[in-house]
């Protein structure tokens, strides 16, 4: 590793290849992984083809010469050493894994970007949205942007670069943020799921603290972010919406033949998205909110009710003219609009309380 006035030169050498991918695919994955870090720092990575590099990259199985043997398929995917003598900076990948450039097996780019973070001196992060979080999650094939937690970590070591193509790095939401707003909320077999950006919180009666996890860690097939969700407990299904598509989940499994188009439920074909949805147990109806209007859907007949859409403000006076998320419990609807939560009595048809959105997490 060589420093000059403008940048920090780091060289890397690929010692061998996996048979799971073509050589040019491996080269491309590693190049892309290094770029993740060079985009936000003065680091400049150069590939060399002989001699000893700062980062020696290799594939191996079981005992592979560094006294830290791999364990076969799954388990330990790879490891890397922090900068230093001997093995310092080197990155080793378990060739008993199935490596890919998509969601099959393990995505080489994502694992390599994580390991190269270790090669540069980063430790694991406790932020579930961070690249350096110790649990692998496939986050999609394109459009990866280094999360803010990782940017802060690497820039603390090397400083900031002057060529960041992604000045907005995704941040992990804070449940007690007074400005917290939600994307969607639903129950799933007694557990509450609260969605924000590419995450959701799991609120379970047996859990003291809400658990924040990546959406993709549970459902790799779903988009990174959803617009609305609701549970139909009679059918034991949860429906999730993104744009013009809807997915059905039985437990944590996506139902066959989904996703479907939302117009198949009776919405106008020009409808672009659903903002919020809630199933009202006592009526058997599901309410869908989009813009300043809402629809009522009969779950038994699977038909949209006549006389809709109606204006939100006329039916649910005081909650505003839009709904970000909504759920029902014990005869009350809980509407979320920006940083506010409205407790609405279905029986008396009026707002009972106005709370902060973050009160959902006992903040």
Image (cartoon, rainbow, N blue to C red):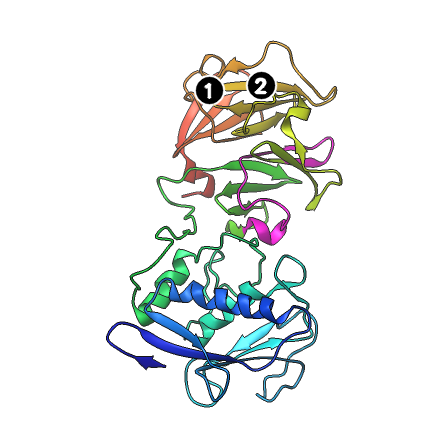
**Residue drawn at (65%, 14%) of the image:** 305
Kindly report the distance in space between the C-alpha atoms of the residues bearing marks 2 and 1.
11 Å
Residue toward you, 211 or 117: 117
Task: Provide the secondary structure element on which disc 2 rests.
Answer: strand
Is 225 within the magenta?
yes
Q: Up-down: is 108 above or below 328?
A: below
Q: Position of residue 4 (x, y in %)?
A: 27, 78
How many marks the image carries: the answer is 2
Question: Which residue is the site of mark 2?
Answer: 295
**Residue drawn at (43%, 22%) of the image:** 319
> Farthest top residue?
307
Residue toward you, 355 or 47: 47
Residue 96: quadrant of the picture: bottom right
Q: Position of residue 188 (x, y in %)?
A: 64, 40
Looking at the figure, which quarter contains the N terminus?
bottom left
- In the displayed structure, does residue 23 sit left or right of residue 258? left
Question: Which residue is the site of mark 1?
Answer: 292
- The reply to whether discs 2 and 1 touch (Cβ–Cβ < 8 Å) is no
Label 1 packing within 10 angstroms: few (<14), some (14-19), many (20+): some
Q: Up-down: is 18 above or below 264?
A: below
- In the displayed structure, does residue 198 sit left or right of residue 168? right
Q: Which residues are magenta?
A: 214-239
**Residue drawn at (47%, 72%) of the image:** 116
Tell me if residue 348 can be seen: no
Task: Provide the secondary structure element on which disc 1 rests.
Answer: loop
Q: Position of residue 190 (x, y in %)?
A: 64, 40
Q: Up-down: is 64 above or below 125?
A: below
Q: Position of residue 237 (x, y in %)?
A: 70, 36
Tell me if residue 213 can be seen: yes
């Amino acid at each position: 590793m060589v420093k000059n006035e403008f940048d920090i030169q780091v060289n890397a050498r690929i010692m061998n290849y996996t048979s799971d991918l073509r050589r040019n695919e491996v080269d491309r994955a590693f190049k892309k992984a290094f770029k993740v870090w060079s985009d936000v720092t003065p680091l400049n990575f150069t590939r060399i083809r002989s001699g000893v590099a700062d980062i020696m990259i290799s594939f191996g199985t079981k005992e592979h010469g560094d006294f830290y043997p791999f364990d076969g398929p799954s388990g330990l995917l790879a490891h890397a050493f922090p900068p230093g003598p001997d093995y310092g900076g080197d990155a080793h990948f378990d060739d008993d894994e199935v490596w890919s450039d998509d969601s099959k097996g393990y995505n080489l780019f994502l694992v390599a970007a994580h390991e190269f973070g270790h090669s540069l001196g980063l430790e694991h992060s406790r932020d579930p949205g961070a690249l350096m979080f110790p649990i692998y999650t496939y986050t999609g094939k394109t459009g990866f942007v280094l999360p803010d937690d990782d940017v802060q970590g690497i820039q603390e070591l090397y400083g900031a670069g002057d060529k960041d193509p992604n000045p907005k790095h995704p941040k992990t939401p804070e449940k007690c943020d007074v400005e917290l707003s939600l994307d969607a909320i639903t129950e799933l077999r007694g557990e509450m799921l609260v969605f924000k950006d590419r995450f959701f919180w799991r609120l379970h009666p047996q859990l003291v603290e809400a658990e924040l996890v990546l959406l993709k860690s549970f459902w790799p097939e779903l988009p990174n972010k959803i617009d609305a969700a609701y549970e139909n407990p009679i059918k034991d299904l949860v429906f999730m919406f993104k744009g013009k598509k809807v997915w059905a989940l039985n437990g944590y499994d996506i139902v066959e033949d989904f996703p479907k188009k939302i117009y198949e439920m009776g919405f106008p074909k020009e409808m672009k998205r659903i903002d919020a949805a809630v199933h009202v147990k006592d009526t058997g109806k599901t309410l869908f909110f989009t813009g300043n209007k809402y629809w009522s859907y009969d779950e038994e007949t699977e038909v949209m009710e006549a006389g809709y859409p109606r204006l939100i403000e006329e039916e649910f006076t005081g909650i505003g003219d839009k709904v970000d998320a909504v759920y029902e419990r014990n005869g009350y609807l809980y509407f979320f609009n920006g940083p506010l939560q409205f407790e609405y009595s279905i029986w008396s048809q009026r707002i009972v309380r106005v709370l902060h959105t973050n009160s959902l997490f006992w903040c």
